Structure formats: C-alpha cells, structure tokens
Image: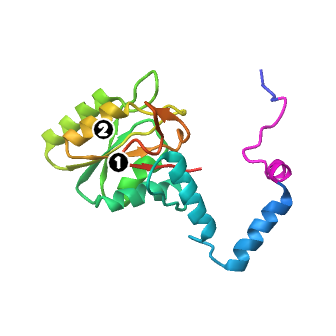
Amino acid sequence: MSYQPSKMIGIFDCATSQKVIGQEKFLDAFKTILNHGAYCQGPETKELDTKLAEYSGTKYCSTCGSGTDALTLALMAWGVKEGDAVFVSSFTFVASAEAPVLLGATPIFVDSKPDTYNMDPEDLKRAIAEVKAAGKLNLKVVIPVDIFGSPCEYDEIIKIAHENGMKVLSDSCQSYGSVYKGKNAGSIADMTATSF
C-alpha cells in the first residue's frame, strides 16, 4: 500500500509571498539596502531589533545570522568555556547542544517530560547532582528548549539553576509569540535565543 498526497506542501513558497507582500515591495527593499550598502547591522536590522525587543518586553535585542549564532553568542557573553557543564534539553534541534561544544563546554542532556517534551525540572536536579558528584565540570548554564510552542516550566527551572549558581538561556525558537504566566517568550529567562 502506498500513500500519495493529494497536494504537495512547499516549505517556503516565494511566489505566494510575493503575491501577498507585493513584488515591488521586495524589490524596493533590496534597492534600499543596495543603495545604502549596510548589508549587516544596517537601519533595517536596528529597526527589527527594536521591534523584537518591544514585542518581547525586553530592553535589548541583537539579531544575528542564525539560532546557533544566537545561542553561541549568549554563552560567550557569560564566558562559557572548556570545563563548563551546560545542561540542555534532550528533545531539541542540534544547535542547542552544538553551541556549548563550539566553545569547548560539555553539554549534559536533561530528559524531557513525556506530556510536553520540555525539560523535566526533576531530571535537571538529578543531572546537576551527578555532575557535582563527579566533580569534573563547573556548573554554568541551563538551556531549556520550548517545544511545539509551549514554554518550559521556567519558575522551577530558573529556581534550580540560580540556586546552583547558573544562568538560564531560553531556546525559544519554537515558542516565540507564546506567553508563560503573563510574560512573553523572550523575556522569561536570563537571556533568550530564537530564530526564524
């Protein structure tokens, strides 16, 4: 038995986007950028940073090339390096674990809750205890990953992390636009990374 889909669903349909937004608007935007020559960190980027910060309810936002870059830059800002433990959700895209590795740190996978697939705070406690008992790594950061638009249990995760001297870097790539207890994704943890 073989299944034949009735209609192909494209990942990104440029033709439809141009119809909705208008090809002239696309071309005008490209011409503006070509004319001022600020291909990176130009006025359009600054405008996007401002709008994303306002939407998230944060003071700052800095856009970059990818979600991997966003995670890596945040970890760099906190001085993550070789010998540091970074606790990462086990159910995630590779970038969440790749970012610590790029800096020489060790990702420690934390199991997910079976009903949400988000980081399990109880398993985070277990993982922290194991790393402490081994005595080989410095506790540094927790990266909970919001899955399927559902924010993690941040109250509990932040409490556990801060009690153990760690920062929380929220990976909100799948939850940007969602709300957790009245706070927008992007404004809940010590720092947040997202991508589009």
Q: Secondary structure at mark 2?
A: helix
Q: Which residues are magenta?
A: 6-21
Q: Nearer the viewer, residue 4 or 33?
A: 33
Q: Indicate yes or no whether the magenta region holds residue 10.
A: yes
Q: Indicate yes or no whether the magenta region holds residue 19.
A: yes
CB within 8 Å, label 2 to label 1: yes
Residue 144 x/y as whole percent: 39, 39
Q: CA distance from mark 2 to mark 1?
A: 9 Å
Q: Secondary structure at mark 1?
A: loop
Crowd band around label 2 with a 10 angstrom C-alpha radius: few (<14), some (14–19), many (20+): many
Give the vertical position of 70 relative to 151 (above or below): below
Give the vertical position of 35 relative to 83 (above or below): below
Crowd band around label 1 with a 10 angstrom C-alpha radius: few (<14), some (14–19), many (20+): few
Residue 164 x/y as whole percent: 19, 41
Mark 2 or mark 1: whose residue is earlier in sequence: 2
Quarter the N terminus occupies? top right
Residue 23 figure quarter:
bottom right
* Three-letter code for the amino acid on which mark 1 is drawn: Asp
Residue 167 x/y as whole percent: 29, 48
* Three-letter code for the amino acid on which mark 2 is drawn: Ile
Q: Nearer the viewer, residue 79 or 129?
A: 79
Give the vertical position of 157 relative to 105 (above or below): above
Q: Which residue is mark 2?
A: 158
Q: Which mark is residue 142?
A: none
Q: Which mark is residue 190?
A: 1
Residue 120 x/y as whole percent: 35, 29
Q: Residue at x 49, y 60 (%)?
A: 62
Q: Residue at x 16, y 41 (%)?
A: 132
Is 134 displayed left or right of 148 in the figure? Answer: left
Residue 105 figure quarter:
bottom left
Q: Nearer the viewer, residue 59 or 28?
A: 59
